[in-house]
Image (tube, rainbow, N blue to C red):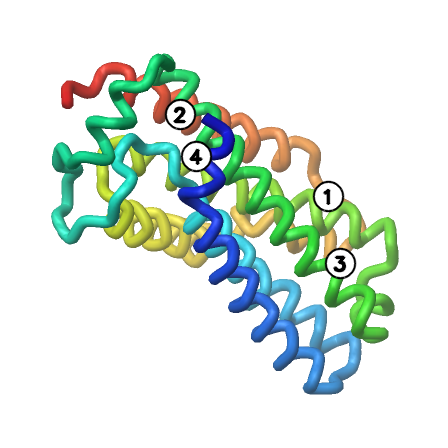
């Protein structure tokens, strides 16, 4: 199941990698002081990383994009359901592949900016960089888990719309949800906030498993 799961997400990985490279090239071409990078690291860049995670979540049963708000029984779904593998394992394997791809994109994107932009190294010394990365991974992981849960009941199009809408609403309406801010402003972070986000993400993955196990196709 690992290889088929990778086959499903590989072109999304290529698309997001190209998108991130384009954004990174534009940012690196604009030489700005560390203070401007701090604003970018607090604003646009976290949302770009979260977008990547949401789009790489594909733990639902449906493997084809539809323009209907609910999943329909398609040939790809019937084939997937006929495989000699439990639905639980199916969800967990596909979720793991998407999570690894998301983590790789986040780490590569942030590492590339840190290595290529001297102002980023000034804004993010190594200890702060590590805490900032953990915070971004935690929030992106929550977005990934939400998208995974929605994938259990919606097709890919509405899964993405719904996940991005909910994540954007939470981050704009609840500033405390932007847990990366403490790493940038204070050089410290809250273990409680990290733990809460990760527990919530784990609960959403568990919900996705239960939804797929109980769904009648």
Q: Nearer the viewer, mark 4 or mark 3?
A: 4
Judge the density around disc 1: few (<14), some (14-19), many (≥20) Cα neighbours within 10 Å.
many
Q: Earlier in the sequence, mark 1 or mark 3?
A: 3
91, 110: nearer the viewer: 91
Pinpoint residue 116: horizontal percent, then vertical percent: 80, 71
Q: Tell me whether the residue at label 2 lies in contact with that at label 1, contact meaning CB atoms closer than 8 angstroms.
A: no
141, 97: nearer the viewer: 97
Which residue corresponds to mark 4?
4
Q: Secondary structure at mark 4?
A: helix
Q: Tell me whether the residue at label 4 lies in contact with that at label 3, contact meaning CB atoms closer than 8 angstroms.
A: no
Residue drawn at (18%, 49%) of the image: 66
Pinpoint residue 159: horizontal percent, then vertical percent: 29, 45
For the residues marked 1 and 3, what is the alpha-carbon distance in whole angstroms?
Answer: 20 Å
Q: Secondary structure at mark 3?
A: helix
For the residues marked 4 and 2, what is the alpha-carbon distance in whole angstroms?
Answer: 12 Å
- Left or right: where 197 falls relative to 37: left
- Left or right: where 138 falls relative to 127: left
Which residue corresponds to mark 3?
111
Q: Secondary structure at mark 2?
A: helix
């Amino acid at each position: 199941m690992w290889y088929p799961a990778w086959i499903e997400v590989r072109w999304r990985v290529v698309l997001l990698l190209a998108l991130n490279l384009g954004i990174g090239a534009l940012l690196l071409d604009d030489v700005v002081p560390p203070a401007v990078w701090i604003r970018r690291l607090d604003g646009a860049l976290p949302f770009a990383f979260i977008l990547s995670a949401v789009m790489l979540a594909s733990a639902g049963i449906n493997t084809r994009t539809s323009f209907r708000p609910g999943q329909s029984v398609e040939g790809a779904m019937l084939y997937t359901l006929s495989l000699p593998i439990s639905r639980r394992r199916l969800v967990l394997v596909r979720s793991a592949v998407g999570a690894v791809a998301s983590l790789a994109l986040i780490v590569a994107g942030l590492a590339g900016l840190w290595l290529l932009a001297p102002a980023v190294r000034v804004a993010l010394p190594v200890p702060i960089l590590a805490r900032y990365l953990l915070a971004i991974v935690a929030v992106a992981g929550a977005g990934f888990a939400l998208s995974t849960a929605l994938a259990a009941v919606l097709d890919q199009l509405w899964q993405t719309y719904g996940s991005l809408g909910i994540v954007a609403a939470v981050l704009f309406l609840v500033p405390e949800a932007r847990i990366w801010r403490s790493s940038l402003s204070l050089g410290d972070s809250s273990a409680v906030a990290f733990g809460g986000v990760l527990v919530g993400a784990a609960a959403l993955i568990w919900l996705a498993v239960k939804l797929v196990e109980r769904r009648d196709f």
